[in-house]
Amino acid sequence: MIIQPTASHFIDGKYVEDTAGDAIPVIYPATGELIATVYSATPAIIDLALASGTRAQKEWASWTATDRGRVLRRAADIMRDRNHDLSVLETYDTGKPYQETSVADATSGADALEYFGGLAASITGEHIQLGEDFVYTRREPLGVCVGIGAWNYPTQIASWKAAPALACGNAMVFKPSETTPLCALKVAEILIEAGAPAGVYNVVQGYGAVGASLVTDPRVAKVSLTGSVPTGRKVYAAAAAGIRNVTMELGGKSPIVIFDDADLENAVSGAILGNFYSSGQVCSNGTRVFVQKGIKDTFLARMVERLKGVKMGDPQDPDVNFGPMVSERQRDIVADYIKKGIAEGARLVAGGSVVKGDGYFIEPTVFADVTDDMAIAREEIFGPVLSVLEFDTEEEALARANDTEYGLAAGVFTADLTRAHRMVAGFEAGTCYINTYNLAPVEAPFGGSKQSGVGRENSKAAIEHYSQIKGVYVAMGDVEAPF
């Protein structure tokens, strides 16, 4: 099985190769097999991409917003037409089951391209009357934007960052995660096929040093990162040195609070989506599940029963619904956290083992009797490990839910909607859910507070992060001066 791309990079509308960079092996997580090799961008490749983006951005910004929108909407149509092939590639790149990638990855990318394509023509300024004088504003692009992707949703993230950036008239140089480098190249291909000028969306591969070079280049006006909090701190600091705009969508240790009046099946379903979808490799996952004391045992029993529906195996099999970790390293990180949970006194209710054989599979794992000070309740694991914490009162649940440096997401399950709205008002999190979890429609803003990031992906809010306002004062009479 070889999925070797045409070349490592996509610059100025075509594939570009330079094997002088460090080799980046692409491993299929389901088997551990090498399926491709790409090469990290050299300084020459980085310069070529930024020069191409700088030139193309000026042309792209001169287009009418309606014309830019048409390109994005055509790209969305192409992406949907190729959903099967893109989903197969995403599964090879990440190991996520085709059952999931076929409905949640390229489809989400297409939604973003369509949404921002439709929104492009509405990106306008305003008129402010000041007596006879007036001010008008122009909403203008920032210039060349750098996007740095995470490995869990490579097609989606490449599209989520491209769509608002391009709708506003920017160009983008996108660096995928070195763990999943394949999918973004297809996004670049599709944008060119849809009519975007060469250079408007370039893809370069690389490890952290490539990202650092992009973030600190004086030609870059904006940096958008999806990644971990430690990476975010480094990128944010480097971008700040150049007074660059940033969007940071970082990690989390999000709470799901389940009251005893909640619909049990819905609550269990929400906890499954918030812990085991994508094998737990989702930044907004609700890995601290606070369950009110009266239903804790019932909740745990039903969760164990539902986990019997897990089917591991070849992720390309449409019947398989649970895939491997993205890499051997990530599997080992998760396995170490499971050991810590047991050592710290949490009660293992389900799973807990690395699956023997090929690939990087680990069982969906449930811990009970977890306390707030345990590592599995404090630190982001990024794997299929669910921690159940018991609580008595609403006030207690809210205080404990907020007792974290993170603030990406939070959810509540209850039949009392007044209480539900009190809880989401009190949650210190940027993305909240009532009686559901982990949905991310492009129409809604997505992002965090505290250490989980700054800015928002998606929705009209994203336009604010990829554009700037210019105010123009127009005088209708003479100019007065003191002398």
Image (cartoon, helix red, strand yellow):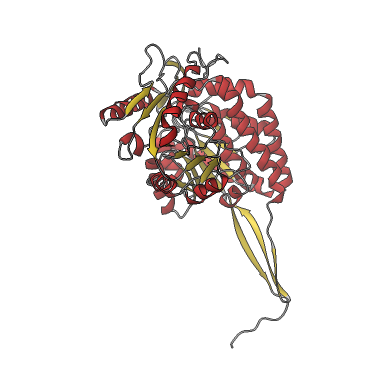
Q: Is residue 233 left or right of residue 91?
A: left
Does residue 93 appear in this view? yes
Q: Please tell me whether residue 23 is drawn above or below residue 378 in the rendered image.
A: above
Residue 223: x, y in percent? Answer: 49, 46
* Above or below for 46 versus 181: below
Eyeballing the image, is 54 above or below 19? Answer: below
Q: Residue furthest bottom?
A: 483
Which one is nearer the viewer's eye here, 258 or 441?
258
Q: Residue 314 placed where, x, y %?
A: 50, 13
Q: Is residue 27 left or right of residue 53?
A: left
Name which quarter of the figure residue 107 lies in: top right
* Above or below, 268 relative to 88: below
* Residue located 58% across and 49% down the image: 466
User: Which of the 4 image quadrants contains residue 185?
Assistant: top right
- Residue 420 percent coordinates (x, y): 53, 45
Q: Is residue 36 visible?
A: no
Task: Using residue 73 as the reference point, say whether residue 301 is left or right of it.
Answer: left
Closer to us: 453 or 441: 441
128 or 451, which is in the foreground?
451
Q: Is residue 238 left or right of residue 459?
A: left
The quarter of the image holding the C terminus is bottom right
